[in-house]
């Protein structure tokens, strides 16, 4: 649970190789929270910490998927119920 509520919209368990530090983390997208939460796990499945990500973008995160190469994709929208499309697909790749 989250206090304050973030209105989770999707969840994904990361198994890719592109972000070794994120392997076996849970990603939760948020509508009202306008962020992505990465939940890192420790021993015996105990949640260690929640890290908010991308809140500075000020968008609603609708969905998260991982492709076959381990890159992450997020579907976003600016406003709920907008008559015209205002979302985007964001691809997250490591910086080297």
Image (cartoon, rainbow, N blue to C red):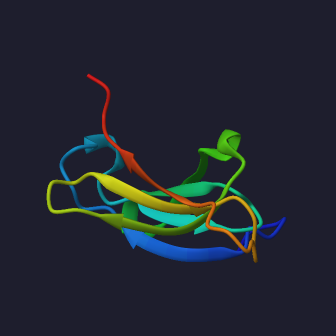
Residue depicted at x 73% and y 74% = 83
Residue depicted at x 15% and y 54% = 69
| Number of callouts | 0
The spot of residue 40 in percent (x, y) is 46, 55
Query: Furthest-front residue in view?
Result: 84
Residue depicted at x 57% and y 65% = 29
For the N terminus, the image quarter is: bottom right
Q: Give the side of residue 79 with respect to residue 74, left or right.
A: right
Q: Give the side of residue 18 with respect to residue 51, left or right.
A: left
Check the image and report above or below for 82 versus 24.
Answer: below
Q: Give the side of residue 1 with respect to residue 91, left or right.
A: right
Check the image and report above or below for 68 versus 94.
Answer: below
Q: Closer to the camera, 36 or 92?
A: 92
Q: Quadrant of residue 67?
A: bottom left
For the C terminus, the image quarter is: top left
The spot of residue 3 in percent (x, y) is 82, 66
Check the image and report above or below for 62 versus 38.
Answer: below
Q: Closer to the camera, 42 or 2?
A: 2
Q: Quadrant of residue 60?
A: bottom right
Residue depicted at x 47% and y 62% = 27
Query: Furthest-right residue in view?
Result: 4
The spot of residue 2 in percent (x, y) is 74, 68
Check the image and report above or below for 72 versus 54.
Answer: below
Q: Closer to the camera, 41 or 15?
A: 15
């Amino acid at each position: 649970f989250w206090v304050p509520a973030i209105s989770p919209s999707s969840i994904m368990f990361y198994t890719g190789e592109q972000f070794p530090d994120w392997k076996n983390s849970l990603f939760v997208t948020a509508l009202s929270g306008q962020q992505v939460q990465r939940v890192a796990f420790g021993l015996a499945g105990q949640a260690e910490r929640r890290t908010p990500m991308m809140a500075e973008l000020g968008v609603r995160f609708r969905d998260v998927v991982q492709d076959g190469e381990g890159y992450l994709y997020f579907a976003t929208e600016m406003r709920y119920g907008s008559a015209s499309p205002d979302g985007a697909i964001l691809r997250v790749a490591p910086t080297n």
